Image: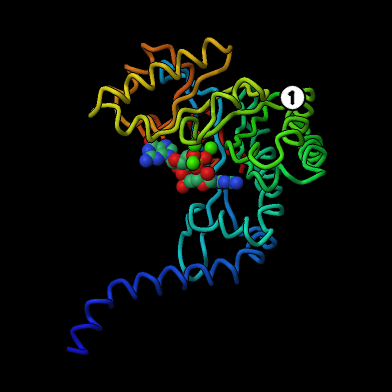
Amino acid sequence: AKNGGRNRYSFFERQMDEALRLRKVVEDDLRAAILADELQLHYQPQYKANGEEIVGVEALVRWPHPQHGWISPQQFIAIAEERGLIIPLGEWVLRKACEDAKRWPGLRIAVNVSPIQFRQRDFVSSVMNIIEEADIDPTRVELEVTEGVVMDDADAAEEAMMELRARGVRLALDDFGTGYSSLIYLRRFAFDKIKIDRSFLESMETTGESAILVHSVVHLGRALGLTVTAEGVETSEQHRFLQALGCHELQGYLFSKPVPAHEIDKMLGIAPDE
Ligand code: C2E
Ligand code: CA
Ligand code: CA
Ligand code: CA
């Protein structure tokens, strides 16, 4: 009976062990990985509604761990936030993305920003310094933030956002529709764009309600003068539906997964430099 009991729990225990082991790997190695330039950026193209013309790319961080293989951002961003590592990580991501973006004139470069970065007193000057050092036009840079940004200190967030926009940096509200009071945020804060969360698209084909929601969100965004992007587009049915609704931009596996910078070069017909 003792043995049976142990076996019944062993699967769960193994999963716990796995999660704890991974957490420990991240805690032990992330700081050094950032300093040693071990992280990488992949880029997912963003297309006009026709699905043909690339208008921008979203930078997504990747960590190829020398011993443990690829660790996904879902597994390490939260720990980086807890440990204060999101600040150096976020600066590394923005710097690298701006450098890479110089090879892609005319394309927008979207970078994800954690609420914790946004909360830093010197966030705006840190962003502007990196953009100036890279010597790219600030209007090409788009910061993707979630509702969390405005949750605890709305006044400070509003000020930082106004300042960034005054300097030409664009702001997108990411994962739109997954939070609590998105509509209020849209009215108050200076966003250029909303990104409709892919959870809406996932259920769109099976239930009529989701299709109605997507329809409403696209029209709302357009009515407010915002650019509307749908993320997680996986099927041509979704593409046709979103295009017909008047969604401005699309991103998803149907068009391209996130890929290394040299793959973006190829898509744009840029010859490799070495
Ligand atoms: P996100 O910003 O919502 O990014 C979209 C995620 O959906 C990415 O996952 C992307 O690879 C994935 N995706 C794109 N198209 C499709 C699709 O058609 N189908 C499906 N199923 N998935 C799709 P990824 O790269 O694993 O990133 C996960 C999250 O980690 C991001 O969600 C973002 O919140 C965070 N993250 C990634 N890079 C950074 C970063 O540099 N800084 C910060 N603060 N967060 C980051
Ligand atoms: Ca994003
Ligand atoms: Ca998103
Ligand atoms: Ca997300």
The residue sitting at 43% across, 11% down in the picture is 246
Q: Is residue 263 visible?
A: no
Q: Which residue is mark 1?
A: 165
Above or below, 34 relative to 50: below
Q: Residue furthest bottom?
A: 2
Among the 4 quarters of the image, the one containing residue 83: bottom right
Q: Is residue 207 left or right of residue 257?
A: left
Label 1 neighbour load within 10 Å: few <14, some 14-19, many 20+: some
Say which of 189 and 88 sits in front: 189
Q: In the image, is the residue at mark 1 within 8 Å of ligand 2 by its beta carbon? A: no
The residue sitting at 37% across, 30% down in the picture is 200
Residue 53 location in percent, x, y?
48, 19
Residue 205 location in percent, x, y?
25, 27
Quadrant of the frame with the C terminus: top right
Say which of 129 and 213 sits in front: 213
- Amino acid type assigned to the residue bearing label 1 in the image: Arg
Above or below, 145 relative to 52: below
- Badge 1 marks a residue whose secondary structure is helix
Q: Is residue 241 left or right of residue 270?
A: left
Above or below, 10 relative to 171: below
Residue 226 location in percent, x, y?
57, 16
The residue sitting at 67% across, 44% down in the picture is 96
Quadrant of the frame with the N terminus: bottom left
Residue 4 location in percent, x, y?
18, 84
